[in-house]
Image (spheres, rainbow, N blue to C red):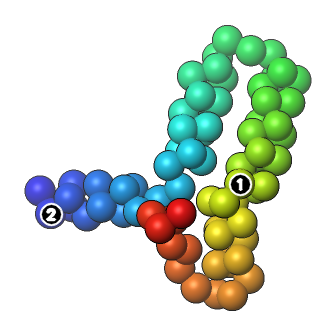
Amino acid sequence: MKVVIDLAEMLAKGPMNAFGSSKKLFYHAFQETLETQMAMESEYLAERANSKEGREGIAAFIEKREAVYFKL
């Protein structure tokens, strides 16, 4: 049970909008052509990179620290 709680806490601290975008892409994966799916992934990636979450993730990576999403 501790593993489940730890996973839930880790996900709760993560980038919720990015998780949502990933979920949408996953649901469309088997309904779209490869080209359409890749275009959607490119669009979502650009949107997420330009969001507060994306900027925090990129800054954390560059600064070699853990990203803090829940304060955004």
Specify whether 46 is left or right of 26.
right
Q: Determine which residue is flagged by label 2.
A: 2
| Left or right, residue 57 beside residue 14 | right
User: Looking at the image, is 41 positioned above or below residue 18?
Assistant: above
The correct choice, above or below, for 39 with respect to 51 in the image is above
Q: Residue at x 64, y 20 (%)?
A: 28
Q: Is residue 38 visible?
A: no
- Rendering quarter of residue 25: top right
Q: Residues within 10 Å of mark 2 (few under 14, many from 20)?
A: few
Query: What secondary structure is marked by label 1?
Result: loop
Where is residue 60? Give x, y as percent: 64, 78
> At which x and y percent is residue 21?
61, 37
For label 1, the crowd category at 10 Å Cα-Cα, with few meaning under 14, some 14 to 19 and many 20 or more, is some
Residue 62: assigned label? none
Percent position (x, y) of residue 20? 54, 38
User: Which amino acid type corresponds to the residue marked 2 in the rendered image?
Assistant: Lys
In the rendered structure, the answer to whether residue 58 lies left or right of residue 69 reads: right
Check the image and name the residue furthest to the left. 1
Whether residue 50 appears in this view of the structure is yes
Residue drawn at x 53%, y 56% is 15
Residue extending farthest to the front is 72
**Going by the image, does 3 lie left or right of 11?**
left
Residue 51 is tagged as 1
Q: Secondary structure at mark 2?
A: helix
Q: Earlier in the sequence, mark 1 or mark 2?
A: 2
At a point 45% along the width and 64% down the height, the residue shown is 70
Please identify the quarter of the rendering in which residue 42 is found. top right
Where residue 4 appears, x then y in whole percent? 21, 55
Quarter of the image with the N terminus is bottom left
Structural distance between the alpha carbons of marks 1 and 2 = 32 Å
